[in-house]
Amino acid sequence: MASKEKSAYVAAKHAVVGLTKTVALETARSGITCNAICPGWVLTPLVQQQIDKRIAEGVDPEQASAQLLAEKQPSGEFVTPQQLGEMALFLCSDAAAQVRGAAWNMDGGWVAQ
């Protein structure tokens, strides 16, 4: 996945996935697991700034969020902090004991496109 004009940001995201895989291999026999959660749009202060910019341009607040989501996230909904937390809890559970080096996309279908 890539986004124009965001080379440093995208490079950092790719680095996290590579680091996750490397750590997973290095710790595979130790009982330590390492995985990455890769969220799409989450309503954070950074994302809110992008919404606010659209509002300042005269776009209705609800429509500003919808426009932003429509650009990348097919579900049309933000990933919630609650959902991210639940995924993290799963990855820390016994049910995920053999999940290692995985990049879990929580992005409303963003990378499925």
Image (cartoon, rainbow, N blue to C red):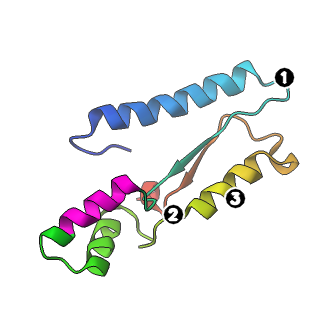
Total tally of numbered discs in the picture: 3
Q: Main secondary structure of the magenta part?
A: helix
Say which residue label 1 marks. Answer: 29
Q: What element carries label 3?
A: helix
Image point (72%, 18%), residue name: 26
Among the 4 quarters of the image, the one containing residue 62: bottom left
Tell me whether circle 1 and circle 2 mark residues in contact (CB < 8 Å): no
Q: Position of residue 63 (x, y in %)?
A: 27, 79
Q: Where is residue 76 in the image (x, y as percent from the top left)?
A: 41, 73
Residue type, label 2: Val
**Mark 3 and mark 1: Cα distance apart in space:** 26 Å
Question: The C terminus lies in which quarter of the figure?
Answer: bottom left
User: In the image, 59: left or right of 97?
Assistant: left
Image point (25%, 65%), residue name: 52
Residue closest to the far left? 57
**Mark 1 and mark 2: Cα distance apart in space:** 33 Å
Of labels 1 and 2, earlier in sequence is 1
Of labels 3 and 1, earlier in sequence is 1
Q: Is mark 2 on a helix, strand or loop?
A: loop
Q: Which mark's residue is nearer the viewer, 1 or 2?
A: 2
Question: The N terminus lies in which quarter of the figure?
Answer: top left
Say which residue label 2 marks. Answer: 79
Residue range in magenta is 45-54
Residue type, label 3: Glu
**Mark 3 and mark 2: Cα distance apart in space:** 12 Å
Q: Residues within 10 Å of mark 1 (few under 14, many from 20)?
A: few
Say which residue label 3 marks. Answer: 86
